[in-house]
Image: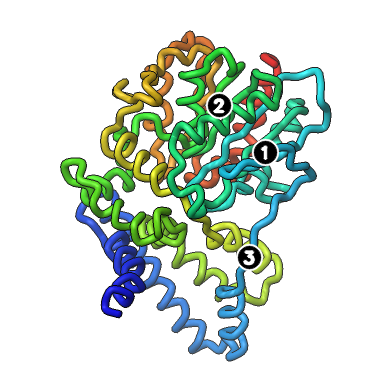
Amino acid sequence: MRGARHRRRSPYFLTMIATRPFIGPRLLETWTRGWQAAIDGASGYLEASLSGEIEPLDHVRWWNHVVRRQVPEWASPHEIVLEAPLARLRDFSSTRRGVVPTLVLPPQAGHDSCIVDYSSTQSQMGAILEAGLERALALDWVGATPATADASIEDYLEVVDDAVKHCGGTVNLIGDCQGGWLAAIYAALRPERVNTLTLAGAPIDFHAGEAVIVEIVRQLAPDGNLWFYEALVAAGGGVLNGRHMLSGFIAINPADEISRQLDLFRSVGDPTHVDRYTEFEDWFKHTQDIPGAFYLWIVRHLFADNALIHGGLEIGGTRVELDKIDMPLNLLGGERDHITPPAQVFALGDACGTPPEQIRTFLSTGGHLGLFMGSEALREHWPVLLADVRKRS
């Protein structure tokens, strides 16, 4: 009984450890902004209460919207053309001929892959089709189960390779965030299968810039000791619980979470605002688990050792050499991206073998998620880079 009580309490205990503030300039800055947002919100609430702007029923409406979540959905018409234990392949194509297929690897950080097709007006897949890349497909990562808890980096690369083969053997490869470093590894190992490579918010040099996540990893894994991360995986029965990832993201930038909930309270009577809030929360708060073996590999080799950029990464006995990437390259970073600072993305431009005249960099003024579904990136940056991809397809 004592052991059972310990196991039930472990995930919560470990999450509390994972989200405690660590001493460091970037993390201290984000927590300061969070406290300021809380203070500003409390002041606004008191002011609205004293002025009579807040009605008693508003509290009930607000709470209902906060706790009521639904499974997020893909916005655009498509069909599932391939299914595997780790992923599905979704085909958005409007034609089956005439252009090199474009394959998108979405982020995989405990959230649904539909971020790349977020809504009818905010869709990376829609931008691809509008650019004339009429053969467009996206992998949809499946949440981990006990059966896939031991999935490895080799297994994920095999999924990508199967998707590329389904597309005909050559693709324009687009990778977002975690999907981006996976795309870069695949392109380095299989350059003959990648016509063009586009990365958005994808860490390549994990230690460049002032990344909050790397700051946390240094605190939690001193000298490469992964005991904390191994305990997280063990507490999840071999998988990393998606709720832990969500807690970590909120802790990294609490000001956004506080502001979002307070903005909802102030605008709870505005249907447009409520719909926009609900759409994002359904995606953000609907979590999925990650295979434990894959997660621990990422923490050790990429976040802790930074082996991808240092050239010491080996997969299946083969060294991953970024200078084997010789195809046209597009790199998109976010000026306010606290998850993946632009320097981490743009580092590939110096490490790859692509001729300088075929490397293009783009800098959005927004943050991390805005690179995949933000109006600025989809309106100003993606059409430009995708137009060049279309010319080469």
What colouring does the structure picture have? rainbow
Q: How many marks?
A: 3
| First along the sequence among labels 3 and 2 | 2
Q: Secondary structure at mark 3?
A: helix
Residue under circle 1? 89
User: For residue 196, what is the image quadrant?
Assistant: top right
Residue 344: percent from left, percent from top? 38, 32
The front one of 349 and 92 is 92
Residue under circle 3? 278
Q: Are marks 1 and 2 in contact (CB under 8 Å)?
A: no
23 is higher (above) or lower (below) than 159? below
What's the residue type where badge 1 is placed?
Answer: Leu
Question: What is the crowding at mark 2: few (fewer than 14 residues within 10 Å), some, or many (at least 20)?
Answer: many
Question: What is the crowding at mark 3: few (fewer than 14 residues within 10 Å), some, or many (at least 20)?
Answer: some
Residue 294 visible in the displayed image: yes
331 is higher (above) or lower (below) than 51? above
Q: CA distance from mark 1 to mark 3?
A: 26 Å
Residue 81: percent from left, percent from top? 74, 38
Residue at horizontal 77 percent and vertical 42 percent from the top = 79
Residue under circle 2? 198
Q: Are marks 1 and 3 in contact (CB under 8 Å)?
A: no
Residue at horizontal 40 percent and vertical 71 percent from the top = 40
| First along the sequence among labels 1 and 3 | 1
